[in-house]
Structure formats: structure tokens, C-alpha cells
Image: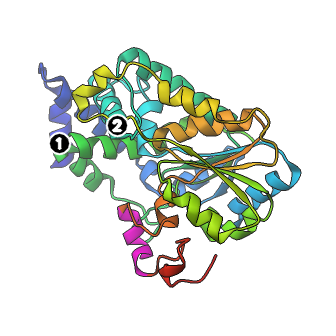
Amino acid sequence: MLISTIKHLSSMQTPDTEVAEVARVISDVLARPQCLDPRAVADIYRRQGLLVIPDPSATAISERVIRALQSQQPLSAIRIGDGEANLLTHNAYATPKLNAEVGKLILFMQSDSLEATDKWLKRLSRLMHLSILEADIVGVRGLWISKGDPLKKQDETAYCGQIQTAGPAELRGLTGVWRATDYLLQLGQQGALQNKMICSAHFYLSILANLEQILAQTSCVYLITERSDLLALFTNRFANVAFKLIPVGSLRPEQPSSLDRVRELSFLGSTFRQIPRNMAGTLCLVGAGVWAELYCTWIRRRGGVAVDIGSGMDLLAGQCSRPVHYNWGLHEDLRYSLSESSGRARP
């Protein structure tokens, strides 16, 4: 029934571009169901000659960071989730109205934001591409499902049913997750991921679980986050390391329409100016939404080791902020919290 409805939508001569574009998204999903199968996704990457680590808690991820710090070699570890994919794939798929809408929605969701013009969305897409090209570790969607069996194939018909009935916010997330998988596989086919470690976009679990061993390799750590409370928590826990905070997240729009009034990338420039020119042997833990990929790239260019841990910053502060945190039961023991009052064992 769903497939016949999709065919009907696709064949309709209608002025409703949104309906036609949603039908096109569904058609893409049905044409490439392997994007909803973690084992198939991993196999495709491996056939491209890539090192693939599906388990987000695998120690191999942290060991790669440790080796970079020990040898004082630059490293960028970024994560391409649904939000990053909303920007990365702007104009990559033949759904221009949807592309513009999801781009604007993801920018509105950021703590720091800017004007969502087509010009800026195209520019941000290029910057995201550069971040991937220059990265050493790329966390991707599709390798590891965050609920239930992490390697279970999702049913494409059910997924398309969700897309068909989704509101704007849900549609942004659903298309973003699928395109984050599909488009990265395309980049891999084009050779853009060569010599990179490919792992789950949730690889911050490995970083948090092995944080003590990672921090033992450096004397200086920069925290790029809006969670200023983490500075004291890190300092109290790791007395032999100097921690420095680069605060972000002060330019939050009140509503989507207010994005039109945010016309300068002042927050990006401010962050960039606080990054030292020589970052060799220095670790940077970054939690800054979609801007983390840009910050990690800049830090790597200056010789540092930059790791996007995203909502892992909240876990370090003893808070679960994403549904996936609850799916994994992290609210029950707060195992990654830096607070002594959390009652869990130190990392």
C-alpha cells in the first residue's frame, strides 16, 4: 500500500513541491535499503578499503587519539550526524525546497547561529566537505543503531512510513539520518575517505570510557563548549593537567525568523582567535553542535588533537540530554560523570 502511494505521489502533477519532494526522498530510501542495514553499511565501507570500527565504545578509537598525542601529530575526529548532514548535503539531492528548510531548521537549533541564506548554506556545505577531507577519524551514521540490537536492519517500508507522516522537525531528522549514511557512502566511493578510520557517530563513548588514559598523554587540554561548569569538574578530577575553556553558544536565535538578523559569523571568528597557533601535543575536546567540525579542522591545522564529543559534554557533567543516552541506560549510573557525587567509579 505504501509503495503504491509513493508511486502515486511521484506521478502527480501537483504544484505542491513539498509533497513531490517527500515522495522523492522516499523513493531514494527504497532504492538504497542497504543504508538502513548496519552490517551492509560496514561491508560497503570495507570494500572501499577503509578501516571500520562500528562499536562506538571500541578502545581502538581512543588508542588512535592516544597515539596522536604521544607522537605530537595533529588529528581531527569529527562526527557526521543528521544535523551535519543537513548542511553537508545542501543541493546534493534534487529536493531544493526541503534542502533549504532542513538547513534553516538545523541552524536554528544551534546555540550559535547565523543567517540561513542559500549563499551561506552552500558555503557551509563546502566547509563540511573540507572538514571530512582533512579528518583522521570520521564518525558516521548507519554503522550502529542506537536502540535495541545495534546491528539490526531497519525496515525500509516502516522508515518511509515515518517520513511520509512526519512534521517538519521529524522530517529534518529522518532525512538527515538517512542522508548522513547515504552521502558518506558516496564520498567513500569517490575516494574522499581514504586513510581515515570510519566509526560510529557515537564514538564519544570510547573517549569518555578511556578519558583518564587519554589525558595522561598531555599537559594541556582546551574545552570548547557552552558548559562552563565542566572547567571546574575537569580541574578537580585531573590535577596534573591544565584545562582552558573556550566558551561558545552565546548567539542563540529566539525563533527561526530571527536567523535573518544574525548576519555575521562573529562567534566563529571569536573562537578561532582563541586557538593558539602552535597546538602540538594539545588535546581539544569539542562540543559545539555542527560548528564542532569546523573547530576540529582549524585545531588540526595548528597541530593539535581535536575530538568532537558532542553531547558527551553533558554526560561528563552528569546529565543525559539525548534519547540515546536513556536507550543505553546512562541515566541509571551516570558512569561518565566527572562529579564525585555521582556515585560511580572513576574512569
Queried whether the magenta region covers residue 328, the answer comes back as: yes
The spot of residue 211 in percent (x, y) is 67, 66
At x 50%, y 85%, the residue is 343
Q: Secondary structure at mark 2?
A: loop
Please tell me whether residue 158 is drawn above or below residue 25 in the rendered image.
below
Please tell me whether residue 116 is drawn above or below residue 69 in the rendered image.
above
Task: Say the numbered circle drawn on residue 4.
Answer: 1
Along the line of sight, which residue is nearer the eye, 68 or 96? 68
**Mark 2 in CB contact with mark 1 (< 8 angstroms):** no
Horizontally, residue 298 falls left or right of residue 255, namely right
Q: Quadrant of residue 149?
A: bottom left
Q: Which residues lie in the magenta part?
A: 323-332
Question: In the orientation shown, which residue stands out farthest toward the top?
Answer: 119
Alpha carbon distance from label 2 to label 1: 43 Å
The spot of residue 10 in percent (x, y) is 20, 30
Q: Secondary structure at mark 1?
A: helix
Q: Which residue is mark 2?
A: 252
The spot of residue 100 in percent (x, y) is 31, 25
Q: Amino acid at mark 2?
A: Arg
The colour scheme is rainbow
